[in-house]
Image: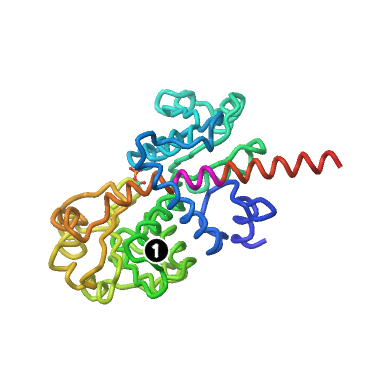
Amino acid sequence: MTTEESARALQLTPDGQLRHFLTLDGLDQSLLTQILDTADSFIEVGERRIKKVPLLRGRTVVNLFFESSTRTRSTFELAAKRLSADVLNLDISTSATSKGESLSDTLLNLEAMASDMFVVRHSRSGAPHFIAESVTPGVAIINAGDGRHAHPTQAMLDMLTIRQHKQRFDGLKVAIVGDILHSRVARSQIRALNTLGAEEVRVIGPSTLLPRDVESLGCRVEYDLKAGLKDIDVIIMLRLQRERMEGALLPSEREFYKVYGLNTDKLAYAKPDAIVMHPGPINRGVEIESAVADGPQSVILNQVTNGIAIRMAVMSMAMSGQLAQRAATEAEARV
Ligand code: CP
Protein backbone atom coordinates (compact mmCIF):
# COMPACT_ATOMS: atom_id res chain seq x y z
CA MET A 1 0.00 0.00 0.00
CA THR A 2 1.33 3.52 -0.83
CA THR A 3 1.48 6.26 1.84
CA GLU A 4 -1.49 7.93 0.17
CA GLU A 5 -3.53 4.73 0.21
CA SER A 6 -2.75 3.99 3.85
CA ALA A 7 -3.57 7.60 4.88
CA ARG A 8 -6.87 7.25 3.05
CA ALA A 9 -7.68 3.86 4.55
CA LEU A 10 -7.01 5.09 8.10
CA GLN A 11 -8.95 8.34 7.76
CA LEU A 12 -11.98 7.29 5.71
CA THR A 13 -14.78 4.76 6.07
CA PRO A 14 -15.05 2.17 3.27
CA ASP A 15 -17.64 4.40 1.57
CA GLY A 16 -15.36 7.47 1.71
CA GLN A 17 -16.68 9.38 4.75
CA LEU A 18 -14.23 11.12 7.06
CA ARG A 19 -13.74 9.27 10.39
CA HIS A 20 -10.36 10.66 11.54
CA PHE A 21 -8.64 13.85 10.32
CA LEU A 22 -4.87 13.38 10.51
CA THR A 23 -3.36 14.63 7.26
CA LEU A 24 -4.48 15.91 3.86
CA ASP A 25 -2.50 13.10 2.20
CA GLY A 26 -4.86 10.75 0.41
CA LEU A 27 -7.86 13.13 0.59
CA ASP A 28 -9.24 14.21 -2.78
CA GLN A 29 -10.60 17.51 -4.07
CA SER A 30 -14.24 16.57 -3.53
CA LEU A 31 -13.69 15.78 0.16
CA LEU A 32 -11.72 19.01 0.76
CA THR A 33 -14.48 20.95 -1.02
CA GLN A 34 -17.08 19.19 1.15
CA ILE A 35 -15.17 20.35 4.27
CA LEU A 36 -15.08 23.94 2.94
CA ASP A 37 -18.79 23.89 2.03
CA THR A 38 -19.73 22.43 5.43
CA ALA A 39 -17.64 25.12 7.16
CA ASP A 40 -19.40 27.79 5.07
CA SER A 41 -22.71 26.55 6.44
CA PHE A 42 -21.39 26.94 10.03
CA ILE A 43 -20.22 30.55 9.61
CA GLU A 44 -23.79 31.73 10.11
CA VAL A 45 -23.94 29.89 13.48
CA GLY A 46 -21.15 32.14 14.78
CA GLU A 47 -23.22 35.20 13.88
CA ARG A 48 -26.32 34.10 15.83
CA ARG A 49 -27.23 35.38 19.31
CA ILE A 50 -27.26 31.76 20.57
CA LYS A 51 -24.22 30.26 18.84
CA LYS A 52 -25.16 26.58 19.07
CA VAL A 53 -26.32 23.63 16.97
CA PRO A 54 -27.07 20.18 18.46
CA LEU A 55 -24.88 18.03 16.16
CA LEU A 56 -22.56 16.72 18.91
CA ARG A 57 -25.04 16.85 21.81
CA GLY A 58 -24.24 14.09 24.29
CA ARG A 59 -20.75 13.55 22.81
CA THR A 60 -17.52 14.11 24.73
CA VAL A 61 -14.55 15.82 23.05
CA VAL A 62 -11.16 15.75 24.81
CA ASN A 63 -8.54 18.37 23.90
CA LEU A 64 -5.13 16.80 24.36
CA PHE A 65 -2.49 19.46 23.77
CA PHE A 66 1.03 18.23 24.53
CA GLU A 67 2.43 21.46 23.00
CA SER A 68 1.43 25.07 23.63
CA SER A 69 -1.33 26.64 21.56
CA THR A 70 -3.52 29.72 21.66
CA ARG A 71 -5.57 29.83 18.44
CA THR A 72 -5.93 26.12 17.68
CA ARG A 73 -6.85 25.03 21.19
CA SER A 74 -9.35 27.82 21.83
CA THR A 75 -11.04 27.54 18.42
CA PHE A 76 -11.34 23.74 18.78
CA GLU A 77 -12.93 24.30 22.19
CA LEU A 78 -15.35 26.92 20.85
CA ALA A 79 -16.15 24.74 17.83
CA ALA A 80 -16.96 21.71 20.03
CA LYS A 81 -19.11 23.86 22.34
CA ARG A 82 -20.97 25.39 19.37
CA LEU A 83 -21.72 21.82 18.27
CA SER A 84 -23.12 21.23 21.83
CA ALA A 85 -20.46 18.66 22.83
CA ASP A 86 -19.15 18.27 26.38
CA VAL A 87 -15.53 19.42 26.27
CA LEU A 88 -12.67 18.33 28.48
CA ASN A 89 -9.40 20.28 28.23
CA LEU A 90 -6.68 18.11 29.71
CA ASP A 91 -3.90 20.13 31.30
CA ILE A 92 -0.89 18.09 30.28
CA SER A 93 1.48 19.92 32.66
CA THR A 94 -0.52 18.60 35.65
CA SER A 95 -1.73 15.31 34.11
CA ALA A 96 -0.37 11.81 34.68
CA THR A 97 1.87 12.06 31.57
CA SER A 98 4.00 14.54 33.54
CA LYS A 99 4.32 11.81 36.22
CA GLY A 100 5.67 9.25 33.78
CA GLU A 101 2.45 7.65 32.48
CA SER A 102 2.73 6.61 28.83
CA LEU A 103 0.57 8.24 26.15
CA SER A 104 -1.14 4.86 25.56
CA ASP A 105 -2.08 4.50 29.24
CA THR A 106 -3.39 8.07 29.44
CA LEU A 107 -5.53 7.37 26.36
CA LEU A 108 -6.86 4.09 27.77
CA ASN A 109 -8.02 5.98 30.86
CA LEU A 110 -9.67 8.72 28.81
CA GLU A 111 -11.35 6.11 26.59
CA ALA A 112 -12.68 4.45 29.77
CA MET A 113 -14.55 7.73 30.42
CA ALA A 114 -16.52 7.11 27.20
CA SER A 115 -14.86 9.88 25.20
CA ASP A 116 -15.97 10.18 21.57
CA MET A 117 -13.21 12.33 20.09
CA PHE A 118 -9.62 13.32 20.86
CA VAL A 119 -8.14 16.51 19.45
CA VAL A 120 -4.38 15.98 19.62
CA ARG A 121 -1.41 18.32 19.33
CA HIS A 122 2.00 16.74 19.86
CA SER A 123 5.62 17.70 19.20
CA ARG A 124 6.27 14.23 17.71
CA SER A 125 5.37 13.80 14.04
CA GLY A 126 2.96 10.87 13.71
CA ALA A 127 1.58 10.91 17.29
CA PRO A 128 -2.09 11.44 16.21
CA HIS A 129 -1.63 8.76 13.52
CA PHE A 130 -0.35 6.32 16.17
CA ILE A 131 -3.36 7.08 18.40
CA ALA A 132 -5.81 6.63 15.50
CA GLU A 133 -4.36 3.18 14.79
CA SER A 134 -4.81 2.00 18.37
CA VAL A 135 -7.94 3.79 19.59
CA THR A 136 -11.26 1.99 20.28
CA PRO A 137 -13.47 1.79 17.15
CA GLY A 138 -15.96 4.67 17.16
CA VAL A 139 -13.57 7.25 18.66
CA ALA A 140 -12.44 9.97 16.22
CA ILE A 141 -8.93 11.46 16.27
CA ILE A 142 -8.34 14.98 14.96
CA ASN A 143 -4.79 16.21 14.39
CA ALA A 144 -4.23 19.71 15.84
CA GLY A 145 -0.59 19.79 14.67
CA ASP A 146 2.10 17.11 14.96
CA GLY A 147 5.81 17.97 14.88
CA ARG A 148 6.86 19.13 11.43
CA HIS A 149 4.42 16.76 9.77
CA ALA A 150 0.93 18.23 9.37
CA HIS A 151 -1.58 20.79 10.62
CA PRO A 152 -4.56 19.91 8.44
CA THR A 153 -7.26 22.06 10.11
CA GLN A 154 -4.96 25.11 9.85
CA ALA A 155 -4.50 24.46 6.12
CA MET A 156 -8.25 24.06 5.65
CA LEU A 157 -9.09 27.29 7.49
CA ASP A 158 -6.52 28.99 5.26
CA MET A 159 -8.22 27.51 2.18
CA LEU A 160 -11.59 28.76 3.42
CA THR A 161 -10.12 32.25 3.85
CA ILE A 162 -8.58 32.17 0.36
CA ARG A 163 -11.87 30.99 -1.18
CA GLN A 164 -13.79 33.76 0.60
CA HIS A 165 -11.45 36.43 -0.78
CA LYS A 166 -10.60 35.02 -4.21
CA GLN A 167 -13.71 32.84 -4.89
CA ARG A 168 -11.62 30.15 -6.61
CA PHE A 169 -8.33 28.19 -6.58
CA ASP A 170 -7.72 27.69 -10.29
CA GLY A 171 -5.47 30.40 -11.71
CA LEU A 172 -4.25 31.42 -8.23
CA LYS A 173 -0.56 31.90 -7.47
CA VAL A 174 0.28 31.51 -3.81
CA ALA A 175 3.60 32.32 -2.10
CA ILE A 176 4.58 30.76 1.24
CA VAL A 177 7.43 32.74 2.79
CA GLY A 178 9.96 32.04 5.55
CA ASP A 179 10.74 28.98 7.64
CA ILE A 180 9.34 26.18 5.48
CA LEU A 181 11.78 23.61 6.87
CA HIS A 182 10.19 23.42 10.33
CA SER A 183 6.63 24.15 9.26
CA ARG A 184 3.87 21.55 9.48
CA VAL A 185 1.51 24.34 8.33
CA ALA A 186 3.41 24.84 5.04
CA ARG A 187 3.37 21.11 4.26
CA SER A 188 -0.40 20.91 4.74
CA GLN A 189 -0.99 24.16 2.82
CA ILE A 190 1.06 22.98 -0.18
CA ARG A 191 -0.93 19.74 -0.23
CA ALA A 192 -4.29 21.53 0.08
CA LEU A 193 -3.49 24.11 -2.61
CA ASN A 194 -2.37 21.45 -5.08
CA THR A 195 -5.40 19.24 -4.37
CA LEU A 196 -7.78 22.18 -4.80
CA GLY A 197 -6.18 23.14 -8.13
CA ALA A 198 -4.13 26.30 -7.43
CA GLU A 199 -2.07 27.28 -10.50
CA GLU A 200 1.21 27.66 -8.62
CA VAL A 201 2.59 27.32 -5.11
CA ARG A 202 5.88 29.17 -4.65
CA VAL A 203 8.00 28.80 -1.52
CA ILE A 204 10.36 31.69 -0.72
CA GLY A 205 13.09 31.59 1.90
CA PRO A 206 16.79 31.09 2.56
CA SER A 207 18.15 27.69 1.51
CA THR A 208 18.84 26.85 5.19
CA LEU A 209 15.11 27.09 5.93
CA LEU A 210 13.87 25.03 2.96
CA PRO A 211 13.63 21.22 3.06
CA ARG A 212 16.08 19.57 0.66
CA ASP A 213 13.32 17.90 -1.38
CA VAL A 214 10.86 20.81 -1.20
CA GLU A 215 9.96 20.76 -4.93
CA SER A 216 8.74 17.18 -4.53
CA LEU A 217 5.99 18.53 -2.24
CA GLY A 218 4.52 20.29 -5.29
CA CYS A 219 5.97 23.81 -5.33
CA ARG A 220 8.50 26.09 -7.02
CA VAL A 221 11.41 27.60 -5.08
CA GLU A 222 12.52 31.25 -5.00
CA TYR A 223 15.26 32.65 -2.82
CA ASP A 224 14.61 36.35 -3.50
CA LEU A 225 11.47 37.80 -1.90
CA LYS A 226 10.88 40.67 -4.32
CA ALA A 227 11.31 38.46 -7.42
CA GLY A 228 9.28 35.69 -5.78
CA LEU A 229 6.28 37.95 -5.13
CA LYS A 230 5.78 38.82 -8.82
CA ASP A 231 2.19 37.99 -9.96
CA ILE A 232 1.29 36.55 -6.55
CA ASP A 233 -2.38 36.57 -5.42
CA VAL A 234 -1.92 35.22 -1.89
CA ILE A 235 1.08 35.68 0.43
CA ILE A 236 1.37 33.37 3.43
CA MET A 237 4.02 34.48 5.93
CA LEU A 238 5.44 31.99 8.43
CA ARG A 239 7.16 32.57 11.73
CA LEU A 240 10.70 31.37 12.50
CA GLN A 241 10.11 28.22 14.53
CA ARG A 242 12.98 28.55 16.97
CA GLU A 243 11.65 25.67 19.13
CA ARG A 244 12.35 23.21 16.29
CA MET A 245 15.66 24.67 15.08
CA GLU A 246 18.87 22.78 15.67
CA GLY A 247 22.11 24.66 15.03
CA ALA A 248 22.67 28.10 13.52
CA LEU A 249 20.41 28.31 10.47
CA LEU A 250 20.27 32.12 10.38
CA PRO A 251 22.76 34.94 10.93
CA SER A 252 20.19 36.89 13.05
CA GLU A 253 16.49 37.78 13.20
CA ARG A 254 17.43 41.32 12.16
CA GLU A 255 19.19 40.03 9.04
CA PHE A 256 16.25 37.72 8.28
CA TYR A 257 13.79 40.63 8.53
CA LYS A 258 15.90 42.73 6.21
CA VAL A 259 15.85 40.07 3.49
CA TYR A 260 12.62 38.11 4.04
CA GLY A 261 10.44 40.28 6.31
CA LEU A 262 7.29 41.49 4.54
CA ASN A 263 7.00 45.29 4.66
CA THR A 264 4.91 47.72 2.63
CA ASP A 265 7.65 48.20 0.02
CA LYS A 266 8.06 44.47 -0.64
CA LEU A 267 4.30 43.86 -0.62
CA ALA A 268 4.06 46.20 -3.64
CA TYR A 269 5.86 43.52 -5.74
CA ALA A 270 2.81 41.20 -5.48
CA LYS A 271 -0.48 41.83 -7.33
CA PRO A 272 -2.22 44.99 -6.06
CA ASP A 273 -5.14 42.93 -4.71
CA ALA A 274 -2.96 40.25 -3.08
CA ILE A 275 -4.06 39.16 0.39
CA VAL A 276 -1.62 38.65 3.26
CA MET A 277 -2.04 35.66 5.56
CA HIS A 278 -0.23 34.28 8.61
CA PRO A 279 -1.19 31.24 10.72
CA GLY A 280 0.06 32.94 13.90
CA PRO A 281 1.57 33.53 16.31
CA ILE A 282 2.99 36.55 14.43
CA ASN A 283 6.35 38.07 15.32
CA ARG A 284 6.17 41.73 14.35
CA GLY A 285 9.48 43.04 13.03
CA VAL A 286 10.81 39.49 12.46
CA GLU A 287 8.77 38.13 9.53
CA ILE A 288 6.19 40.90 9.10
CA GLU A 289 5.94 44.66 9.59
CA SER A 290 3.05 45.91 11.75
CA ALA A 291 1.82 48.16 8.92
CA VAL A 292 1.32 45.02 6.78
CA ALA A 293 -0.03 42.76 9.54
CA ASP A 294 -2.65 45.39 10.45
CA GLY A 295 -3.04 46.81 6.93
CA PRO A 296 -5.90 46.63 4.41
CA GLN A 297 -4.52 43.55 2.60
CA SER A 298 -4.19 41.50 5.79
CA VAL A 299 -6.77 38.75 6.41
CA ILE A 300 -4.95 37.32 9.44
CA LEU A 301 -7.85 37.76 11.87
CA ASN A 302 -10.33 36.35 9.30
CA GLN A 303 -8.21 33.19 9.41
CA VAL A 304 -8.73 32.92 13.16
CA THR A 305 -12.52 33.40 12.85
CA ASN A 306 -12.65 30.77 10.08
CA GLY A 307 -10.83 28.33 12.37
CA ILE A 308 -14.02 27.82 14.36
CA ALA A 309 -16.19 26.99 11.31
CA ILE A 310 -13.56 24.65 9.82
CA ARG A 311 -13.14 22.81 13.12
CA MET A 312 -16.91 22.50 13.50
CA ALA A 313 -17.02 21.01 10.00
CA VAL A 314 -14.23 18.50 10.58
CA MET A 315 -15.53 17.40 14.00
CA SER A 316 -19.12 16.96 12.83
CA MET A 317 -18.06 15.10 9.68
CA ALA A 318 -15.70 12.75 11.58
CA MET A 319 -18.34 11.97 14.21
CA SER A 320 -20.89 11.28 11.51
CA GLY A 321 -18.41 8.96 9.72
CA GLN A 322 -17.70 7.08 12.95
CA LEU A 323 -21.43 6.60 13.60
CA ALA A 324 -22.02 5.41 10.02
CA GLN A 325 -19.18 2.93 10.35
CA ARG A 326 -20.46 1.64 13.70
CA ALA A 327 -23.95 1.15 12.20
CA ALA A 328 -22.49 -0.74 9.22
CA THR A 329 -20.40 -2.99 11.50
CA GLU A 330 -23.44 -3.77 13.69
CA ALA A 331 -25.60 -4.51 10.64
CA GLU A 332 -22.89 -6.88 9.32
CA ALA A 333 -22.71 -8.67 12.69
CA ARG A 334 -26.49 -9.27 12.64
CA VAL A 335 -26.36 -11.03 9.23
N1 CP B 1 -1.63 28.52 14.03
C1 CP B 1 -1.47 27.86 15.18
O1 CP B 1 -1.36 26.63 15.21
O2 CP B 1 -1.43 28.67 16.30
P1 CP B 1 -1.37 28.14 17.80
O3 CP B 1 -0.01 27.54 18.03
O4 CP B 1 -1.63 29.36 18.66
O5 CP B 1 -2.44 27.11 17.98
Pinpoint residue 257: horizontal percent, then vertical percent: 17, 59
SS at mark 1 in the image: loop
Q: Please, which colouring scheme is shown?
A: rainbow
Position of 229 with respect to 37 (left or right) is: left
| Residue occupying image coordinates x 23% and y 73% | 271
Q: Main secondary structure of the magenta part?
A: helix
Where are the magenta residues, as a range? 311-317
Residue 135, by quadrant, is: top right
Residue 175, by quadrant, is: bottom left
Q: Which residue is the site of mark 1?
A: 211
Pinpoint residue 295: horizontal percent, then vertical percent: 16, 57
Where's ligand 1: which quadrant? top left
| Residue occupying image coordinates x 55% and y 36% | 117
| Residue occupying image coordinates x 43% and y 39% | 79
Residue 74, by quadrant, is: top left
Q: Is mark 1 within 8 Å of ligand 1?
A: no
Q: Is residue 133 above or below residue 198?
A: above
Quarter in which the C terminus is drawn: top right
Judging depth in this view, the residue of 197 and 164 nearest the camera is 164
Quarter in which the N terminus is drawn: bottom right
In the image, what residue type sits under mark 1? Pro
Q: How many marks?
A: 1
Position of 287 with respect to 136 (left or right) is: left
Pinpoint residue 45: horizontal percent, then vertical percent: 40, 42
Position of 268 with respect to 220 (left or right) is: left
Pinpoint residue 241: horizontal percent, then vertical percent: 31, 50
